[in-house]
Image (cartoon, rainbow, N blue to C red):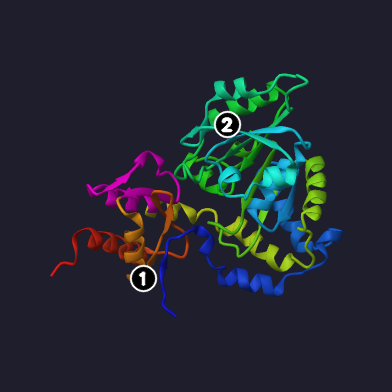
Protein backbone atom coordinates (compact mmCIF):
# COMPACT_ATOMS: atom_id res chain seq x y z
CA UNK A 1 0.00 0.00 0.00
CA UNK A 2 1.42 3.37 -1.03
CA UNK A 3 2.29 5.68 1.84
CA UNK A 4 1.06 9.25 1.42
CA UNK A 5 1.83 12.58 3.00
CA UNK A 6 -1.78 13.17 4.03
CA UNK A 7 -2.83 16.82 4.38
CA UNK A 8 -6.54 16.27 3.68
CA UNK A 9 -7.67 16.89 7.26
CA UNK A 10 -6.63 16.63 10.88
CA UNK A 11 -9.27 13.89 11.12
CA UNK A 12 -6.77 11.47 9.53
CA UNK A 13 -4.58 11.42 12.66
CA UNK A 14 -3.84 8.02 14.16
CA UNK A 15 -4.00 7.36 17.92
CA UNK A 16 -0.69 7.42 19.71
CA UNK A 17 0.93 4.34 21.26
CA UNK A 18 -0.04 5.67 24.68
CA UNK A 19 -3.66 6.02 23.56
CA UNK A 20 -3.73 2.46 22.23
CA UNK A 21 -2.37 1.13 25.52
CA UNK A 22 -4.88 3.17 27.54
CA UNK A 23 -7.72 1.93 25.35
CA UNK A 24 -6.62 -1.68 25.85
CA UNK A 25 -6.47 -1.28 29.62
CA UNK A 26 -9.54 0.97 30.09
CA UNK A 27 -12.01 0.28 32.88
CA UNK A 28 -15.47 0.18 31.34
CA UNK A 29 -19.13 0.02 32.22
CA UNK A 30 -22.41 0.82 30.48
CA UNK A 31 -22.43 4.51 29.60
CA UNK A 32 -26.20 4.64 29.04
CA UNK A 33 -26.49 3.75 32.73
CA UNK A 34 -23.76 6.37 33.37
CA UNK A 35 -21.52 3.80 35.04
CA UNK A 36 -18.56 3.71 32.68
CA UNK A 37 -15.79 5.11 34.93
CA UNK A 38 -13.53 6.15 32.06
CA UNK A 39 -16.29 8.07 30.28
CA UNK A 40 -17.26 9.75 33.54
CA UNK A 41 -13.64 10.80 34.07
CA UNK A 42 -13.41 12.22 30.54
CA UNK A 43 -16.66 14.17 30.89
CA UNK A 44 -15.56 15.73 34.19
CA UNK A 45 -12.15 16.61 32.76
CA UNK A 46 -13.64 18.23 29.65
CA UNK A 47 -16.11 20.28 31.68
CA UNK A 48 -13.38 21.45 34.08
CA UNK A 49 -11.01 22.45 31.29
CA UNK A 50 -13.69 24.57 29.62
CA UNK A 51 -15.05 26.02 32.85
CA UNK A 52 -18.48 24.41 32.60
CA UNK A 53 -20.51 22.33 35.04
CA UNK A 54 -20.85 19.12 33.05
CA UNK A 55 -19.85 17.33 29.88
CA UNK A 56 -21.22 14.66 27.55
CA UNK A 57 -19.21 12.26 25.37
CA UNK A 58 -20.67 11.90 21.88
CA UNK A 59 -19.73 9.95 18.75
CA UNK A 60 -19.16 12.93 16.44
CA UNK A 61 -19.04 16.70 16.20
CA UNK A 62 -22.00 16.81 13.84
CA UNK A 63 -24.12 14.89 16.33
CA UNK A 64 -22.93 17.29 19.03
CA UNK A 65 -24.05 20.34 17.10
CA UNK A 66 -27.41 18.75 16.32
CA UNK A 67 -27.95 17.82 19.97
CA UNK A 68 -27.14 21.35 21.11
CA UNK A 69 -29.44 22.91 18.51
CA UNK A 70 -32.33 20.75 19.66
CA UNK A 71 -31.45 21.41 23.29
CA UNK A 72 -31.97 25.17 22.95
CA UNK A 73 -34.99 25.22 20.61
CA UNK A 74 -38.49 23.93 19.99
CA UNK A 75 -39.85 22.75 16.62
CA UNK A 76 -40.82 25.76 14.53
CA UNK A 77 -38.26 28.07 16.12
CA UNK A 78 -35.67 29.96 14.11
CA UNK A 79 -31.91 29.94 14.57
CA UNK A 80 -29.34 32.44 13.30
CA UNK A 81 -26.20 31.01 11.78
CA UNK A 82 -23.47 31.97 9.31
CA UNK A 83 -23.94 31.00 5.67
CA UNK A 84 -20.55 29.27 5.49
CA UNK A 85 -20.76 27.52 8.86
CA UNK A 86 -20.30 23.78 9.27
CA UNK A 87 -23.87 23.52 10.55
CA UNK A 88 -25.20 24.88 7.25
CA UNK A 89 -22.65 23.49 4.80
CA UNK A 90 -21.73 20.06 6.12
CA UNK A 91 -24.48 18.64 8.35
CA UNK A 92 -26.95 17.40 5.73
CA UNK A 93 -29.72 19.82 6.68
CA UNK A 94 -29.87 18.35 10.17
CA UNK A 95 -31.34 21.45 11.83
CA UNK A 96 -34.37 21.24 9.52
CA UNK A 97 -34.72 17.46 9.51
CA UNK A 98 -33.93 16.70 13.14
CA UNK A 99 -35.02 19.89 14.87
CA UNK A 100 -37.85 21.03 12.54
CA UNK A 101 -36.25 24.46 12.61
CA UNK A 102 -36.02 27.41 10.29
CA UNK A 103 -32.56 28.85 9.75
CA UNK A 104 -31.66 32.47 9.01
CA UNK A 105 -28.25 32.50 7.39
CA UNK A 106 -26.15 35.65 7.55
CA UNK A 107 -23.02 36.29 5.54
CA UNK A 108 -19.80 35.84 7.47
CA UNK A 109 -16.43 37.48 6.86
CA UNK A 110 -13.50 35.78 8.55
CA UNK A 111 -16.07 33.90 10.61
CA UNK A 112 -17.69 37.08 11.91
CA UNK A 113 -21.38 37.84 11.65
CA UNK A 114 -22.20 41.54 11.80
CA UNK A 115 -23.66 42.28 15.23
CA UNK A 116 -26.05 44.92 13.94
CA UNK A 117 -27.34 42.55 11.28
CA UNK A 118 -27.85 39.87 13.91
CA UNK A 119 -29.83 42.26 16.07
CA UNK A 120 -31.97 43.30 13.12
CA UNK A 121 -32.60 39.63 12.28
CA UNK A 122 -33.97 38.70 15.71
CA UNK A 123 -37.73 38.29 15.35
CA UNK A 124 -40.25 40.37 17.19
CA UNK A 125 -42.98 38.63 19.16
CA UNK A 126 -45.56 38.46 16.41
CA UNK A 127 -48.21 35.88 15.50
CA UNK A 128 -46.75 35.61 11.99
CA UNK A 129 -43.13 34.99 12.99
CA UNK A 130 -41.20 32.01 14.29
CA UNK A 131 -39.46 32.53 17.59
CA UNK A 132 -35.73 33.31 17.38
CA UNK A 133 -34.14 31.07 20.02
CA UNK A 134 -30.50 30.49 19.23
CA UNK A 135 -27.38 31.91 17.59
CA UNK A 136 -24.78 29.40 16.41
CA UNK A 137 -21.19 30.44 15.81
CA UNK A 138 -17.99 28.62 14.87
CA UNK A 139 -14.54 29.24 16.35
CA UNK A 140 -12.18 28.62 14.65
CA UNK A 141 -14.18 28.96 11.46
CA UNK A 142 -13.31 26.20 9.00
CA UNK A 143 -14.74 27.38 5.67
CA UNK A 144 -13.52 30.94 6.21
CA UNK A 145 -9.94 29.66 6.40
CA UNK A 146 -9.50 28.38 9.94
CA UNK A 147 -9.77 31.91 11.30
CA UNK A 148 -10.30 32.69 14.96
CA UNK A 149 -12.94 34.97 16.47
CA UNK A 150 -11.59 37.43 19.02
CA UNK A 151 -12.58 37.35 22.68
CA UNK A 152 -13.95 40.89 22.31
CA UNK A 153 -16.28 39.77 19.52
CA UNK A 154 -17.36 36.68 21.46
CA UNK A 155 -18.18 38.83 24.48
CA UNK A 156 -20.14 41.38 22.46
CA UNK A 157 -22.13 38.65 20.72
CA UNK A 158 -22.85 36.89 24.00
CA UNK A 159 -24.09 40.11 25.59
CA UNK A 160 -26.27 40.79 22.55
CA UNK A 161 -27.79 37.32 22.80
CA UNK A 162 -28.51 37.62 26.51
CA UNK A 163 -30.05 41.06 26.05
CA UNK A 164 -32.50 39.47 23.65
CA UNK A 165 -33.11 36.27 25.61
CA UNK A 166 -31.24 34.01 23.17
CA UNK A 167 -28.84 31.12 23.66
CA UNK A 168 -25.38 30.84 22.12
CA UNK A 169 -24.04 27.52 20.88
CA UNK A 170 -20.40 27.39 19.86
CA UNK A 171 -19.26 24.89 17.27
CA UNK A 172 -15.77 24.72 18.73
CA UNK A 173 -14.64 21.64 16.83
CA UNK A 174 -11.08 23.01 16.99
CA UNK A 175 -11.50 25.31 19.99
CA UNK A 176 -8.05 24.45 21.37
CA UNK A 177 -6.53 25.71 18.12
CA UNK A 178 -8.38 28.97 18.72
CA UNK A 179 -7.06 29.20 22.29
CA UNK A 180 -3.50 28.63 21.05
CA UNK A 181 -3.82 31.39 18.46
CA UNK A 182 -5.29 33.81 21.00
CA UNK A 183 -2.70 32.87 23.63
CA UNK A 184 -5.40 32.31 26.21
CA UNK A 185 -6.96 29.61 28.35
CA UNK A 186 -9.73 27.81 26.50
CA UNK A 187 -12.09 28.76 29.36
CA UNK A 188 -11.91 32.37 28.21
CA UNK A 189 -13.53 31.40 24.91
CA UNK A 190 -16.02 28.95 26.39
CA UNK A 191 -17.45 31.43 28.87
CA UNK A 192 -19.12 33.31 26.04
CA UNK A 193 -21.31 30.37 25.00
CA UNK A 194 -24.06 28.40 26.73
CA UNK A 195 -22.96 25.14 25.14
CA UNK A 196 -19.78 24.20 23.33
CA UNK A 197 -19.06 21.22 21.11
CA UNK A 198 -15.45 20.31 20.50
CA UNK A 199 -13.81 17.36 18.76
CA UNK A 200 -11.31 14.94 20.24
CA UNK A 201 -10.72 13.31 16.85
CA UNK A 202 -9.09 16.20 14.97
CA UNK A 203 -5.88 17.87 16.14
CA UNK A 204 -6.23 16.19 19.52
CA UNK A 205 -5.69 12.88 17.70
CA UNK A 206 -8.25 10.57 19.31
CA UNK A 207 -9.66 7.96 16.93
CA UNK A 208 -13.32 8.77 17.66
CA UNK A 209 -15.42 11.18 19.65
CA UNK A 210 -16.41 14.70 20.57
CA UNK A 211 -17.71 16.51 23.65
CA UNK A 212 -20.54 18.85 24.59
CA UNK A 213 -20.11 20.96 27.72
CA UNK A 214 -22.56 23.25 29.50
CA UNK A 215 -24.69 23.46 32.62
CA UNK A 216 -25.73 20.31 34.47
CA UNK A 217 -29.34 20.96 33.45
CA UNK A 218 -28.46 21.31 29.78
CA UNK A 219 -26.21 18.25 29.73
CA UNK A 220 -28.92 16.14 31.38
CA UNK A 221 -31.29 17.12 28.58
CA UNK A 222 -28.55 16.63 25.98
CA UNK A 223 -27.98 13.08 27.23
CA UNK A 224 -31.60 12.25 26.48
CA UNK A 225 -31.42 13.83 23.01
CA UNK A 226 -28.25 11.83 22.34
CA UNK A 227 -30.17 8.65 23.16
CA UNK A 228 -33.02 9.72 20.87
CA UNK A 229 -30.58 10.18 17.99
CA UNK A 230 -29.08 6.74 18.53
CA UNK A 231 -25.95 8.01 20.25
CA UNK A 232 -26.29 6.05 23.48
CA UNK A 233 -23.11 4.00 23.84
CA UNK A 234 -22.21 1.10 26.08
CA UNK A 235 -18.65 0.08 27.07
CA UNK A 236 -17.32 3.18 25.36
CA UNK A 237 -14.62 3.82 27.94
CA UNK A 238 -12.40 1.97 25.48
CA UNK A 239 -12.60 5.07 23.28
CA UNK A 240 -12.91 7.65 26.06
CA UNK A 241 -9.51 6.55 27.37
CA UNK A 242 -7.91 8.07 24.28
CA UNK A 243 -9.88 11.28 24.82
CA UNK A 244 -8.40 11.72 28.28
CA UNK A 245 -4.89 11.55 26.83
CA UNK A 246 -5.95 13.99 24.09
CA UNK A 247 -6.93 16.59 26.68
CA UNK A 248 -3.98 16.02 28.98
CA UNK A 249 -1.15 15.62 26.48
CA UNK A 250 -2.07 16.64 22.94
CA UNK A 251 -3.06 20.31 23.25
CA UNK A 252 0.33 22.01 23.45
CA UNK A 253 1.79 20.12 20.49
CA UNK A 254 -0.78 21.72 18.17
CA UNK A 255 1.39 24.84 18.18
CA UNK A 256 3.63 22.94 15.78
CA UNK A 257 0.73 22.51 13.36
CA UNK A 258 0.17 26.27 13.33
CA UNK A 259 3.84 26.93 12.62
CA UNK A 260 3.88 24.49 9.71
CA UNK A 261 0.73 26.03 8.24
CA UNK A 262 2.29 29.49 8.38
CA UNK A 263 5.50 28.18 6.81
CA UNK A 264 3.62 26.59 3.91
CA UNK A 265 1.47 29.68 3.36
CA UNK A 266 4.57 31.87 3.11
CA UNK A 267 6.08 29.38 0.66
CA UNK A 268 3.17 29.40 -1.80
CA UNK A 269 2.66 33.15 -1.46
CA UNK A 270 5.78 33.68 -3.60
CA UNK A 271 4.16 32.16 -6.69
CA UNK A 272 2.11 34.47 -8.92
CA UNK A 273 -0.08 31.54 -10.01
CA UNK A 274 -1.32 31.04 -6.45
CA UNK A 275 -3.47 33.29 -4.30
CA UNK A 276 -3.46 32.82 -0.54
CA UNK A 277 -5.11 35.09 2.03
CA UNK A 278 -2.44 35.33 4.72
CA UNK A 279 -4.90 36.99 7.10
CA UNK A 280 -6.86 33.75 7.29
CA UNK A 281 -3.80 31.60 8.10
CA UNK A 282 -4.18 31.57 11.86
CA UNK A 283 -4.44 27.95 12.91
CA UNK A 284 -3.58 24.64 11.22
CA UNK A 285 -5.23 25.23 7.82
CA UNK A 286 -4.19 26.89 4.59
CA UNK A 287 -6.72 27.59 1.84
CA UNK A 288 -5.47 28.80 -1.52
CA UNK A 289 -6.68 29.47 -5.04
CA UNK A 290 -5.02 28.22 -8.23
CA UNK A 291 -6.38 27.83 -11.75
CA UNK A 292 -7.55 24.27 -12.45
CA UNK A 293 -7.15 23.25 -8.83
CA UNK A 294 -8.19 19.65 -9.52
CA UNK A 295 -5.19 19.24 -11.83
CA UNK A 296 -2.84 20.21 -9.02
CA UNK A 297 -4.63 17.85 -6.61
CA UNK A 298 -4.26 14.99 -9.09
CA UNK A 299 -0.59 15.81 -9.69
CA UNK A 300 0.18 15.91 -5.96
CA UNK A 301 -1.52 12.54 -5.42
CA UNK A 302 0.77 10.99 -8.05
CA UNK A 303 3.65 12.43 -6.04
CA UNK A 304 2.35 10.84 -2.84
CA UNK A 305 0.73 13.95 -1.37
CA UNK A 306 -2.97 14.18 -0.50
CA UNK A 307 -4.91 17.47 -0.29
CA UNK A 308 -8.60 18.18 -0.89
CA UNK A 309 -10.66 20.55 -3.01
CA UNK A 310 -12.93 23.01 -1.27
CA UNK A 311 -15.05 24.66 -3.91
CA UNK A 312 -12.66 26.69 -6.04
CA UNK A 313 -9.97 26.45 -3.39
CA UNK A 314 -7.58 23.81 -2.12
CA UNK A 315 -7.36 23.08 1.60
CA UNK A 316 -4.20 21.87 3.26
CA UNK A 317 -4.42 20.85 6.93
CA UNK A 318 -1.51 20.25 9.30
CA UNK A 319 -1.60 17.76 12.15
CA UNK A 320 0.57 15.50 14.29
CA UNK A 321 1.04 12.86 11.59
CA UNK A 322 2.79 15.16 9.12
CA UNK A 323 6.37 16.30 9.66
CA UNK A 324 9.01 18.45 8.00
CA UNK A 325 9.70 15.73 5.43
CA UNK A 326 6.00 15.58 4.48
CA UNK A 327 5.90 19.36 4.22
CA UNK A 328 8.93 19.28 1.94
CA UNK A 329 7.17 16.74 -0.31
CA UNK A 330 4.18 19.08 -0.51
CA UNK A 331 6.27 22.14 -1.32
CA UNK A 332 8.33 20.32 -3.96
CA UNK A 333 5.17 18.93 -5.52
CA UNK A 334 3.58 22.37 -5.84
CA UNK A 335 6.73 23.92 -7.30
CA UNK A 336 7.24 21.08 -9.78
CA UNK A 337 3.62 21.35 -10.90
CA UNK A 338 4.09 25.03 -11.62
CA UNK A 339 7.54 25.01 -13.21
CA UNK A 340 8.54 21.42 -13.89
CA UNK A 341 11.44 19.43 -12.47
CA UNK A 342 14.91 20.91 -12.37
CA UNK A 343 17.46 19.07 -14.49
For marks 2 and 1, the one nearer the N-term is 2
- Left or right relative to 227: residue 343: left
Place of residue 269 in the rendered image (x, y in percent of width and height, measured from the top left): 27, 47
Residue 200 placement (x, y as % from top left): 61, 56
Q: Is residue 213 visible?
A: no
- Is 86 contained in the magenta span? no
In this rendering, is residue 270 above or below 114?
Answer: below
10 Å crowding of disc 1: few (<14), some (14-19), many (20+):
some
The residue shown at (81%, 55%) is 227
User: Does the stretch in magenta take in 262?
Assistant: yes
Task: Identify the residue position indicated by label 1 in the image.
Answer: 304
Residue 313, horizontal then vertical, whole percent: 39, 49
Q: Is residue 116 visible?
A: yes
The image quarter in which residue 20 lies:
bottom right
Considering the numbered disc 2 on the image, is that residue within a helix, a strand or a loop?
Answer: helix
Magenta residues, start to end:
261-290
- Against 118, residue 227 (above or below) is below
Which residue is labeled 2 in the image?
154
Figure quadrant of residue 124: top right
Q: Nearer the viewer, residue 284 or 73?
A: 73
Mark 2 vs mark 1: in front: 1
* The N terminus lies in quadrant: bottom left
- Residue 134 tag number: none
- Hey, which quadrant is residue 303 in on the image? bottom left
Cα distance between the residues tagged 2 and 1: 41 Å
Q: Residue at x 28, y 59 (%)?
A: 334
Q: Residue furthest bottom?
A: 1
Amino acid sequence: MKKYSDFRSDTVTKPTVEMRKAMFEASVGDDVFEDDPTVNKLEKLAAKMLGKEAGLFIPSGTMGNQIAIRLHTNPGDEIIVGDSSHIIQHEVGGAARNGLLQTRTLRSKYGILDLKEIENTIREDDIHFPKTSLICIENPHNDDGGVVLSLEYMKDLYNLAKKNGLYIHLDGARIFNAAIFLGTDVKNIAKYADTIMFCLSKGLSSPIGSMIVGTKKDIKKARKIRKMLGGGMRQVGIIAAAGIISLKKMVERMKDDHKMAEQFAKFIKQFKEIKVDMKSVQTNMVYFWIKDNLKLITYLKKKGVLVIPHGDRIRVTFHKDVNDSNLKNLEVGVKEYLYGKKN
